Image (cartoon, rainbow, N blue to C red):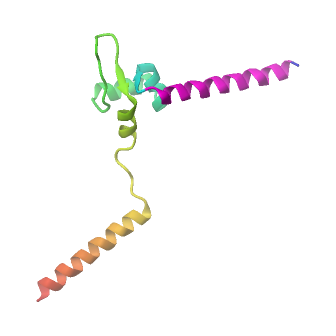
Amino acid sequence: MVEKLKQLDKKLDELTALIQEQNLLQKDVLNFHETCQYLKLSEASLHRLKANSELPFYRPSKRGVYFKRKELDQWLLQNKSNDKTSIEDKAFAYIEAHKTNDIINKH
């Protein structure tokens, strides 16, 4: 019986966490703590990003700091890493462009 209660308690904690995550996805503006949760960062990491102006934020008063979720999403998606196909396509285009230049320069 005690084991069953522990399992139910664990499931309840999991459901609570999922509901909190879903609530964050519904909000347009997040506070500091919510932003830590959303980005899965420690408070120290978020403070560092904010202090170094690496992350857009708003401070309507001296007390609170707020972040637009859409801007956080854009920040997360910056500096895209190229996949193998993308790199091969760029290499092919570069070679083709320089073949044309080489033919023109030889004549």
Instruction: Give the residue displayed 45% in from the left and 20% down from the top.
Output: 33
Does 23 sit left or right of 9 as displayed?
A: left
x, y percent for residue 59: 29, 18
Task: Tell me which segment is drawn in magenta.
Answer: 2-27
Image height of 20 relative to 64, above or below: below
Viewport quadrant of the N terminus: top right
Viewport quadrant of the C terminus: bottom left
Does 59 sit left or right of 84 as displayed?
A: left
x, y percent for residue 57: 31, 25
Image height of 107 relative to 58, above or below: below
x, y percent for residue 56: 30, 30
Q: Nearer the viewer, residue 22 or 90?
A: 22
Among all residues in the image, which is located at the extreme right?
1
Instruction: Give the residue displayed 81% in from the left and 19% down from the top.
Output: 5
In magenta stretch: residue 6: yes
Instruction: Give the residue displayed 37% in from the left and 64% down from the top.
Output: 87
Among all residues in the image, which is located at the extreme bottom?
107
Does 9 sit left or right of 18 as displayed?
A: right
Q: Main secondary structure of the magenta part?
A: helix
x, y percent for residue 63: 33, 10
